């Protein structure tokens, strides 16, 4: 679950209608002992240059060294000229004084003198010689300005007025890949093989990250508005993105290029999903429709109508036959993807439905609403079979746990509540967060949970023992998403500070950070002259 970046309100659905919904997933995993505390160690992001970039850099530096040498020669020549002129004037002044000195020394060594010399002795005995006070010599403004000149102009860089202009210059003219989003991260998805992380941002880009070397590998550009949702196919070859620009885009993860652009929605696309066989992409929008896109034919397959308000979430059953869509109209609609027909309607909530999740065998569906209830639905009868309503704050996140025997829910008051589905009772209230719990992730075995909050912390919980195992704070702004990798190793968090952070789940330590535009510091280290440009918008 996410906060609205436009109006800053929590939780997900905001009056500004810039809605950002993350699909509920219970496929995360975690294992191993989490009982020992570990030190949080920050590691700087790394950058590397391609051979093309190295050649360009070498040529540029060679040219700059020649320019610097010319400046040094000019300064030396002008200084030598001034020194010569000053030395000549000093020599003349000293020579005049030397003439008087020699005259006085002569009078000391001679008893007999000429009439003229005798007259000079008379003047000497009746007058006193003192040094005339003329003061110290100071360099005039012209000379000072000349030698204090910086001598080097970085004309291209000094034209930058914003960080976006500077980054565009670096990426286009220098072919440098700036690491990290320049605006808050809204959506996040992990590939099934745990090798690629995709993040979507209000900077209108998607960034791909290599989990093996913890480095950014590509920037996918094309969207003209916020990237509200991203999803990666099960075979790790396709990425689907939905945006406020009303489009759904399909990207090839092997070539890092656009495959298809689907147009048709008439308002923001809030959520996207992809079937396990890569046949269809599903999108939900503020235009009140769900659209199914045929990825093989690259065309619109089905327009699903029936909602009377904006569609906030879309999920697909594991057999890829059933689609569930949740809406601000307080209804959940079920659809048969194969037959292209409506299966049923789940009615009972009285306000926006912001979280839905299938159980493992897709026989039940859980839903959370702003009417302060959680409901469990039988997908054979389409009836509500369980209702949980003993809470006093808006629900923001929801997930199944421990073999579908429990539901875990996060709330705007910072509490996390564990519900026993069989007894239909509140099992435990896990307290600790100081602000809204925006997102939760539960391991596949349901034993471990990670939570992300507006208080800028993530917390790791032991579900069976109902206790907190660890707390970490590195983000500087609200944490919007949290995901557990499917290989049980890592937790990924994204934040409004524009960064994604990687946490090693077993050792509970901060592993790496995918920086936002602050990583420009690394480029400034490589190219000090860039500081001039970035100082203009810092």
Image (cartoon, helix red, strand yellow):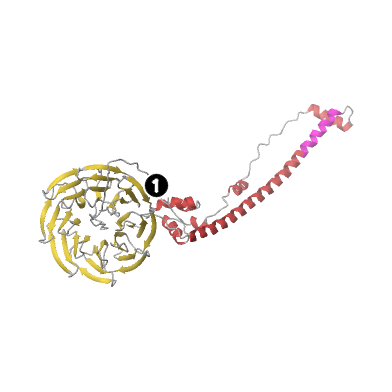
Name the foreground residue: 288 vs 416.
416
Q: Main secondary structure of the magenta part?
A: helix
Q: Is residue 531 visible?
A: no
Question: In the shown orientation, is residue 218 left or right of residue 78?
Answer: left
Looking at the rendered structure, the number of numbered marks drawn on it comes to 1
Vertical arrangement, residue 279 with respect to residue 504, above or below? below
Name the foreground residue: 165 vs 36.
36
Residue at position x 46%, y 53% from top? 523
Quarter of the view holding residue 94: top right
Q: Which residue is mark 1?
A: 43
Q: Residues within 10 Å of mark 1 (few under 14, many from 20)?
A: few
- Residue 104, magenta (yes or no): yes
State the extent of the magenta-drawn residues as a range: 95-109
Name the foreground residue: 281 vs 172.
281
The single residue placed furthest to the front in the displayed view is: 32
Question: In the shown orientation, is residue 536 left or right of residue 96?
Answer: left
SS state under label 1? loop
* Whole-percent x, y for residue 44 in the image: 41, 48
Vertical arrangement, residue 510 with respect to residue 58, above or below? above
* Whole-percent x, y for residue 385 in the image: 10, 55
Vertical arrangement, residue 207 with respect to residue 338, above or below? above
* Whole-percent x, y for residue 225 in the image: 33, 61
* Whole-percent x, y for residue 233 in the image: 29, 62
Name the foreground residue: 430 vs 36.
36
Q: Is residue 92 visible?
A: yes
């Amino acid at each position: 679950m996410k906060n609205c970046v436009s109006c800053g309100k929590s939780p997900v659905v905001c009056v500004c209608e810039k809605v950002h919904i993350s699909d509920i997933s219970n496929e995360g995993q975690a294992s191993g002992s989490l009982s020992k505390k570990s030190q949080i160690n920050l590691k700087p992001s790394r950058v590397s240059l391609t051979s093309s970039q190295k050649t360009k850099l070498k040529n540029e530096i060679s040219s700059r060294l020649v320019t610097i040498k010319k400046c040094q020669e000019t300064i030396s020549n002008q200084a030598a000229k001034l020194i010569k002129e000053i030395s000549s004037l000093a020599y003349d002044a000293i020579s005049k004084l030397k003439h008087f000195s020699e005259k006085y020394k002569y009078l000391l060594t001679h008893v007999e003198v000429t009439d003229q010399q005798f007259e000079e002795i008379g003047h000497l005995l009746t007058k006193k010689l003192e040094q005339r006070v003329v003061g110290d010599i100071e360099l005039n403004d012209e000379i000072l300005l000349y030698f204090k000149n910086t001598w080097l102009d970085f004309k291209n860089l000094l034209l930058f007025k914003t960080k976006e202009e500077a980054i565009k210059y670096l990426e286009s003219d220098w072919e440098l890949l700036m690491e990290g989003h320049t605006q808050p991260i809204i959506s996040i998805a992990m590939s099934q093989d745990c090798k690629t992380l995709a993040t979507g941002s209000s900077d209108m880009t998607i960034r791909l990250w290599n989990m093996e070397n913890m480095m950014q590998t590509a920037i996918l550009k094309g969207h003209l508005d916020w990237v509200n949702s991203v999803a990666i196919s099960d075979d790790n070859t396709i990425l689907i993105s939905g945006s406020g620009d009303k489009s759904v885009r399909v990207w090839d993860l092997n070539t890092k290029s656009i495959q298809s652009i689907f147009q048709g929605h008439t308002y923001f696309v809030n959520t996207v999903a992809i079937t396990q066989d890569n046949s269809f992409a599903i999108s939900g929008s503020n235009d009140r429709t769900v659209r199914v896109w045929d990825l093989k034919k690259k065309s619109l397959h089905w327009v699903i109508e029936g909602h009377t308000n904006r569609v906030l979430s879309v999920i697909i059953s594991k057999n890829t036959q059933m689609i569930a869509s949740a809406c601000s109209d307080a209804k959940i609609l079920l659809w048969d993807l194969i037959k292209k027909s409506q299966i049923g309607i789940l009615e009972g909530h009285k306000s926006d439905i912001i979280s839905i999740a299938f159980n493992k065998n897709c026989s039940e569906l859980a839903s959370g609403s702003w009417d302060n209830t959680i409901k469990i639905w039988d997908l054979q009868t389409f009836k509500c079979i369980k209702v949980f309503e003993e809470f006093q704050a808006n629900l923001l996140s929801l997930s199944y746990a421990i073999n579908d025997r429990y539901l875990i829910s996060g709330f705007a008051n910072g509490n996390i509540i564990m519900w026993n589905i069989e007894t239909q009772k509140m099992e435990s209230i896990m307290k600790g967060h100081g602000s809204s719990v925006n997102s939760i992730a539960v391991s596949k075995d349901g034993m471990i949970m990670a939570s992300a909050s507006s208080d800028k912390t993530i917390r790791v919980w032991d579900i069976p023992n109902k206790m907190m195992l660890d707390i970490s704070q590195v983000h500087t702004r609200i944490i919007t998403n949290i995901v557990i990798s499917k290989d049980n190793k890592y937790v990924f968090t994204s934040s409004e500070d524009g960064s994604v952070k990687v946490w090693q789940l077993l050792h509970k330590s901060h592993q790496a950070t995918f920086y936002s535009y602050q990583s420009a510091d690394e480029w400034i280290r490589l190219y000090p002259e860039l500081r001039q440009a970035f100082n203009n918008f810092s």
